[in-house]
Amino acid sequence: MPDRPPEFSVKIAETEAELRAAQALRYDVFVRELGGGGEMVDHEAGLEQDRFDRYFDHMLVTDETNRQVAGVYRLLRDDQAARAGQFYSEDEYDLSVLKSSGRKLLELGRSCLHADYRGGTAMFHLWSGLAEYVAQHRIEVLFGVASFHGTDLQALTNPLAMLHHNHLAPRELRVRSKVFQNMDLIGEGDLDRKRAMVDTPALIKAYLRLGGFVGEGAFVDHDFNTTDVCLILDTARMNARQRRIYAGGRGRE
């Protein structure tokens, strides 16, 4: 960790340098650490990038004591998706039920933290910034793919089955994987619930605590060396406690 306590700022990238800083952190996490890839990844410059980056807003949490980018989030509103021609997740999931809902949508992606800032308050600041963005743009439904590391489904039997049995989205929000990987890999009575929670990434558990759901079926992404699920969060369904957590303690009942 840094020598001095971090002092965080949160902002949307406005310059090419800020975008590259976000892409550099993504490269460190998704490529160097997790073994991901992609056709537009710039290994020489150390940048994880794709064709959607120019349409997204890129949220950065920066430690002002050393100017280190501590965390990033990629945000795509439905009006931005219209300009892009699609949502990023549409390569993996059929989003028809969300797109036809008439509600204001926000797609989230590429969330990651610098290794030095995990387990601290950087994620809190990222979530608080997201809550302010959602309020500003009057977003009603948030969604996006979140990943388990690796493509070995045998190792993911418990967490995927737990999500299927306990957190499947209601019909009106239930997107479906286009290259369908069944998550109902083990009966509910045979679940090792402790193992399932241990094996579930922190970001997915955070969405579940907020009342989030998952779409039907997983997507195995061999390019990124991940097994993806689609998370959906309906702000209208959040209870008062969940709103307070989501808004960093500033939620209104």
Image (cartoon, helix red, strand yellow):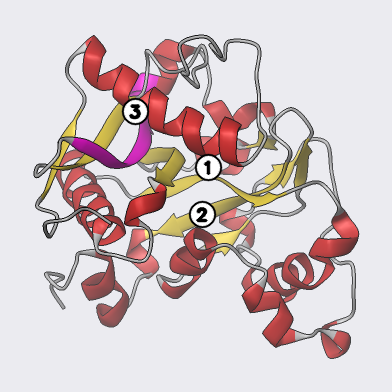
Residue 57 is at least partly visible in this image: yes
Q: Amino acid at mark 3?
A: Ala
Which tag is nearer the camera, tag 3 or tag 1?
A: 3
* Contact, mark 2 vs mark 1 (Cβ under 8 Å): yes
Q: Is residue 78 magenta?
A: yes
Q: Nearer the viewer, residue 143 or 150?
A: 150
Residue linked to disc 3: 22
Q: Estimate how packed mark 2 is, as few (under 14), some (14 to 19) or many (20 or more) residues with alpha carbons within 10 Å.
A: many
Q: Quadrant of residue 84?
A: top left
Q: Secondary structure at mark 2?
A: strand
* Contact, mark 3 vs mark 2 (Cβ under 8 Å): no
Residue linked to disc 1: 98
Real-space Cα distance between discs 3 and 1? 28 Å
Q: Residue at x 71, y 76 (%)?
A: 196
User: Which circle's residue, 3 or 1, is located before the other in the chain?
Assistant: 3
Q: Amino acid at mark 1?
A: Leu
Q: Amino acid at mark 2?
A: Ile
Residue linked to disc 2: 232
Q: Nearer the viewer, residue 60 or 210?
A: 60
Q: Is residue 130 left or right of residue 103?
A: left
Residue at the bottom extreme?
189
* Contact, mark 3 vs mark 1 (Cβ under 8 Å): no
Location of residue 22 with respect to 252 vertically, above or below: above
Location of residue 214 with respect to 193 vertically, above or below: above
Which tag is nearer the camera, tag 3 or tag 2?
A: 3
User: Which circle's residue, 3 or 2, is located before the other in the chain?
Assistant: 3
Where does the image place residue 221, in percent across and percent down from the top left? Answer: 75, 35
Q: Secondary structure at mark 3?
A: helix
Q: Which residues are magenta?
A: 68-80
Q: Is residue 75 magenta?
A: yes
Q: Nearer the viewer, residue 211 or 25?
A: 25
Where does the image place residue 204, in percent across and percent down from the top left? Answer: 53, 61
